[in-house]
Image (tube, rainbow, N blue to C red):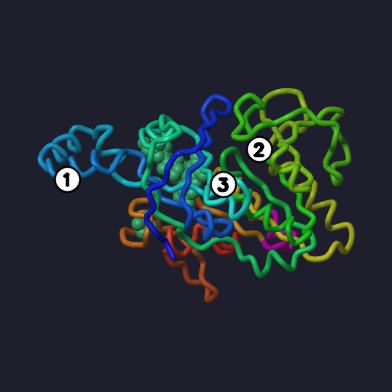
Amino acid sequence: MAVVETASVTRRVELGRSHVRLRLRAERIARESLPGQFVNVRCTPLAFSRKVFEDWDTFLRQRRAGGTGATRTLLMRPFAVYRRWKEGPEKGQFEVLFKVVGRGTAALAQKQPGEEVEVLGPLGKGFDLDWCRRLSTAVVVAGGVGLAPLYPLVEFLRSRDVHTIVIVGVISEHDVPIEVADSRVTLSFVATRPDLTITAKEFERLGCEVGVVALEGDKGYTGLPTEVFDRFLHWSDGGARGEAGVFTCGPWAMMREVARHAAEHDVRCEVLLEERMGCGVGACMACACRIRAANGEVVRKRICVDGPVFDGSEVVWDEG
Ligand SMILES: Cc1cc2nc3c(=O)[nH]c(=O)nc-3n(C[C@H](O)[C@H](O)[C@H](O)COP(=O)(O)OP(=O)(O)OC[C@H]3O[C@@H](n4cnc5c(N)ncnc54)[C@H](O)[C@@H]3O)c2cc1C
Ligand code: FES
């Protein structure tokens, strides 16, 4: 069940040009969140938001004038639970990993250890863990900061001994949401392998095959993550390798391609949609996306409560 917790910031790390990792102490969220669930974070202090409601005329005036920092960060912002610790010295803490794109994320990026933020969660419906348990191979395709919700999933898959391949697409190795390192290890299913690759140690430590694919630069795999994913699909068509599953999160166009190619190869794919939200708890329909029901009818579903994870074959992809 979702709870509101006042979380204290315990660690803050800047990554690349625009990503921040914030560790928060919030016992229940750390203990109860499942892979794929998210939290709503109040990026601007509550007292400041209350002031806006108290001075409603000013609020409306500012809004008509195009909005201010106050109005734009009034709503909580959704973030995936990236890391969480249920035991050990970090017990009771979780991390969000985010890209600074606007007022809310800019305000959140300023938080320092010792400061507090209000957090609501865990929210939403995560990955189908019963299905995950039965897989022999999983391919996880992340685009940029879309890898955040995929970490707990990979952790779960590896704890069940599922052979897991993680493909992370980034613009360049200088603007990545995680720590990367040069490596000599290559993806097993890629025929033409570069001498030097880029890996994400945090995922590698879980025991998966990792390939960072950069759009710019000449090191490692270059191009789009979907191109590397395609090579996996063609390779896996070659023989019976047990049940495979695909998971993706990132830019809409990337997820659409991953879902389409997976369907063409008859592999089930779960997608995590990170569209703009309003209330985050099912009340406003701001996050509605179009889903094709089993009878073929297209219905609107709320990403915040019916998702954010959906079956890739159900999403109507011609928007976004
Ligand atoms: C379930 C879920 C999980 C998410 N997890 C993460 C995460 O782990 N890390 C992370 O960095 N982001 C995540 N996001 C996206 C994040 O919520 C937005 O980037 C954030 O709300 C932007 O707030 P802002 O005030 O900084 O930007 P705003 O000032 O509101 O907007 C700035 C710009 O960003 C665009 N924008 C705003 N929200 C989104 C969005 N959801 N998707 C694409 N563009 C957007 C706007 O169109 C605008 O151009 C998640 C979203 C959802 C729905
Ligand atoms: S954000 Fe309000 S219904 Fe989903």
* Tag 2–tag 3 contact (CB < 8 Å): no
Given this view, does label 2 or label 3 mark the residue nearer the observer? Answer: 3
**Few, some or many residues within 10 Å of mark 2 (<14, 14–19, 20+):** many
Q: CA distance from mark 3 to mark 1?
A: 32 Å
Residue at 67 percent of width and 47 percent of height: 141
Horizontal and vertical percent for residue 121?
A: 43, 56
Which quarter is ligand 1 in?
A: top left
Q: Does any atom of ligand 1 lie closer than 8 Å to the CB of label 3?
A: yes
Instruction: Quickly name the residue at label 2.
Output: 169
- Residue positioned 85% across, 36% down in the render: 185
> Residue 208 magenta-drawn?
no
Report which quarter residue 303 is drawn in: bottom left
Residue nearer the viewer, 320 or 204: 204
The vertical placement of 279 against 197, above or below, is below
Task: Name the element at disc 1.
Answer: helix
Is 252 situated above or below 291?
above
| Label 3 secondary element | loop
The amino acid marked with disc number 3 is: Tyr
Between disc 3 and disc 1, whose residue precedes? 1
Task: Farthest residue to the left: give it.
Answer: 57
**Residue at the image position 68 percent from the left and 63 percent from the top:** 268
Residue sitting at 86 percent across and 35 percent down? 193
Q: Amino acid at mark 2?
A: Gly
Q: Which comes before the other along the chain, label 2 or label 3?
A: 3
Q: Which one is earlier in the sequence, the residue at label 2 or at label 1? A: 1
User: At which x and y percent is residue 71?
Assistant: 25, 39
Residue that carries the numbered disc 3 in the rendered image: 82
Callout 3: 10 Å neighbours few (<14), some, many (20+)?
many
Name the secondary structure under disc 2: strand
Nearest the viewer among 314 and 47 is 47
Please say whether residue 307 is visible from this viewpoint: yes
Residue where numbered disc 1 is placed: 53
